Amino acid sequence: MTVAVFPGSFNPPTLAHRAIVDSVLSDKRIDRVDLTLSLDALNKPRHTQASLGTRCDLLVQVFDDEPRCRIVLTSERLLADIARDYDYLVLGADKALQLHDPIYYSSLEEMRDKLARLPELIVFDRDQYQTLNSDPHWSLPEPLRLASSTKVRAGSWELVPTIIRSQCQAIYGTDQQLDKSSDDQRS
């Protein structure tokens, strides 16, 4: 079985996440996609995150009709570690750039070692980040290429699958509401 891993915070899942999974699964070489959430996501402030359970529930709803998709939790934080033992690593061009950023590694030697062990990359254009990938198979239409969970949390509800849209509006409101509820929980 050939399996691709698609790590993310999915906070919340967007139409772009769904389109990426559908595109990857349309490739006959790939049998399954694991949507993988880190228990402690790197570079994701906790005050903008819905609970892990909530995000998993939303993912289950969005991908319930796709038996070749699994939701996986991991304690790993680095993309290179999350992708260990997979055949493909699926990510946006912005995250592909992070793979080569030394701030995420304890040394340049560690970075080189982890990069050398990466599976084959499937990189999608994202917003202002574009890949050098000449394969149009891994491109999304512009409206989806511009989609982000951050935009959704700011009120762009049209970027969320209809099946979870009303839940997302209730859960996330706006970033300011989420920030306030996180502050209330810390008090």
Image (cartoon, rainbow, N blue to C red):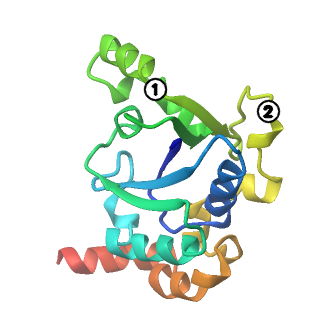
Residue lying at 53% horizontally and 41% vertically, measured from the top left: 2
Mark number for residue 135?
2
| Left or right, residue 34 beside residue 154 | left
Amino acid at pointer 2: Asp
Closer to the camera in the image, 50 or 181: 50
Residue sitting at x 82%, y 53%: 141
Q: Amino acid at mark 1?
A: Leu
* Badge 2 element: loop
What residue is rendered at 64% in x and 37% in y? Answer: 123
Q: Residues within 10 Å of mark 2 (few under 14, many from 20)?
A: few
Quarter of the picture containing the C terminus is bottom left
Where disc 1 sits, the SS reads: loop
Q: Which residue is mark 1?
A: 118
Of callouts 1 and 2, the N-terminal one: 1
Q: What is the spatial separation of the Cα atoms under label 1 and label 2, in whole angstroms?
A: 20 Å
Percent position of residue 113, x then y: 35, 15
In the shown orientation, is residue 6 left or right of residue 162? left
Residue 97 drawn above or below residue 22 = above
Mark 1 burial class by Cα count in 10 Å: few <14, some 14-19, many 20+: many
- Image coordinates of residue 183 in percent, x first then y, are 27, 74
Identify whether 81 is placed above or below 145.
above
Report the residue that reaches farthest toward the top: 109
Q: Is residue 158 shown left or right of residue 175?
A: right
